[in-house]
Image (spheres, rainbow, N blue to C red):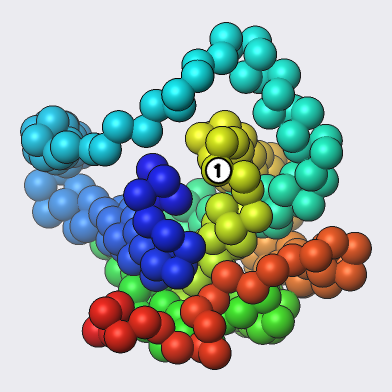
Amino acid sequence: LLPRILDKTKLKLANEIHSVIWSFSYTFGMAVSGFVVYLVGVKTAFFLDAVLFMVAISLLISVLFPETRPEESEGFFTMFKNSFSYLRNEPHIKHLIFLHAFVGFTAFDALVALMVERYYAQAVAVALGIGLLHSLRAVGLVFGPIVIGKWITHKTLVYLLLYQAVSIIIWALVIENFYLSLLASVFVGFATTTLWSYTYTLLQHHTSKEYYGRIVAYNDMMFLLTVAVVSLCIGYMVESGVQLATITMLQGSSFAVAALYFIWIKKNYNIRETSFEDGKMPPELEL
């Protein structure tokens, strides 16, 4: 919806705001759930979750979205065929979808639960430990874009991907120490929101308007598939006896691969800049 109602000048900022809200809600929600489960139990936590969804539905019902129907509608199979033809003719779109999917390697939900149970159970209650770790990562997710949002360009994206790799690997090195792990989780979350929003903006910026909906749907499908596969692999490796620190290092190393992948994409395709001209936001968007 955002690419259809906003011009490209404002789209990057809108994506950053969206990603901050989404990341904060997702991570802070898990953090709060840890505290709620610890204080009032699992059943009450589920009930409160249901209430939140009811509130969200009531808010959505009252929102008026602009009509975005195409002038000429296509059949389902025709749309499906045309979208794949578009991906075949514009291969850089496919690569940008894969690049965005790398952010799915920050799926730490299972990892956090396992590390709290294995390493921190003697220092803190499991539910409380999970809540604290997610709370600290939420701090990084929120404040990261404020610090680096204006700095990120397609030229500096490689460095941000490498930063994400290094921060996760450092987290792996201190994973057995509860307090150092809390501190490391802040720095792990610091770049995630900006990576999500900027790679998403890159895809939107290079996608033709008539294919926005389908390409974004494929992008979300690939991202969520990556998250699911990463979570499954974490469980499988733990069952196979792989250390949590090793698993975390592998997740961090994936972002070094992503950095090399983006270098290859830029070398082989014309990737246009999506940031504001001269690195400055329009006056009406200044906070």
Residue 64 visible in the snapshot? yes
Tag count in the figure?
Answer: 1
Quadrant the C terminus occupies: bottom left
Residue marked by disc 1: 209
Residue at image coords 65%, 10%: 77
Residue in front for this viewpoint, 15 or 231: 15
Residue at image coords 20%, 48%: 37
Quadrant the N terminus occupies: top left
Q: Is residue 177 above or below residue 38?
A: below
Q: Which residue reaches farthest front?
A: 71
Is label 1 in a helix, a strand or a loop? helix
Q: Is residue 94 above or below residue 20?
A: above
Left or right of 136? Residue 37 is left
In x, y percent, where is residue 181? 48, 78
Residue at image coords 68%, 28%: 83
- Amino acid type for the residue under numbered disc 1: Lys
The image quadrant that residue 120 belongs to is bottom left
Residue in front for this viewpoint, 219 or 31: 219
Residue at image coords 41%, 46%: 4
In x, y percent, where is residue 239? 67, 42
